[in-house]
Amino acid sequence: MPVVVATVKTKPGRLADVLAAFRRHTPAVHAEPGCLLYAVHSGEDRVTVIENWADQASLDAHSAGPALEAIGAEIAEALAAPVDVAVLQPVPAGEPGKDRLPQT
């Protein structure tokens, strides 16, 4: 089950615009087949999205889907840098149950 960590660095004064775009389109992402987790987090100059997908096919469909396309179009002018996307797999370590997202 792929885990995605996507970090969006925002231009000064544009964080609220980026968060608004995520708020508008996250319900559509949650409705996509295979979406186990799509959680948006914000900091001073960035938005980080933690995602968990049932399988690679679900992630591929999301990556090519209309919700992500809409988010990208809305936030393009607010980006301070290209979006950093990492697709990861859980690594068992430490205490079982505390070493991965619940769905992985």
Image (cartoon, rainbow, N blue to C red):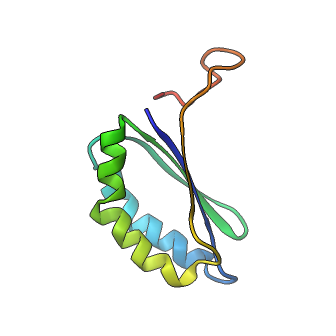
Determine whether, in the image, residue 60 is placed left or right of residue 42.
left
Quarter location, residue 42: bottom right
Image quadrant occupied by the N terminus? top left
Residue found at x 54% / y 33%: 89
Q: Nearer the viewer, residue 104 or 24?
A: 104
Quarter location, residue 88: top right
Quarter location, residue 16: bottom right
Rendering coords of residue 102 (x, y %): 51, 27
Residue found at x 36% / y 34%: 54
Determine whether, in the image, residue 95 is placed left or right of residue 104.
right
Q: Is residue 86 above or below residue 88?
A: below
Rendering coords of residue 26 (x, y %): 40, 59
Residue found at x 29% / y 51%: 61
Count of labels in the image: 0
Rendering coords of residue 53 (x, y %): 40, 39
Q: Nearer the viewer, residue 36 or 86?
A: 86
Residue found at x 46% / y 66%: 22
Q: Nearer the viewer, residue 91 or 36?
A: 91
Q: Is residue 89 above or below residue 93?
A: below
Q: Is residue 78 above or below residue 25?
A: below
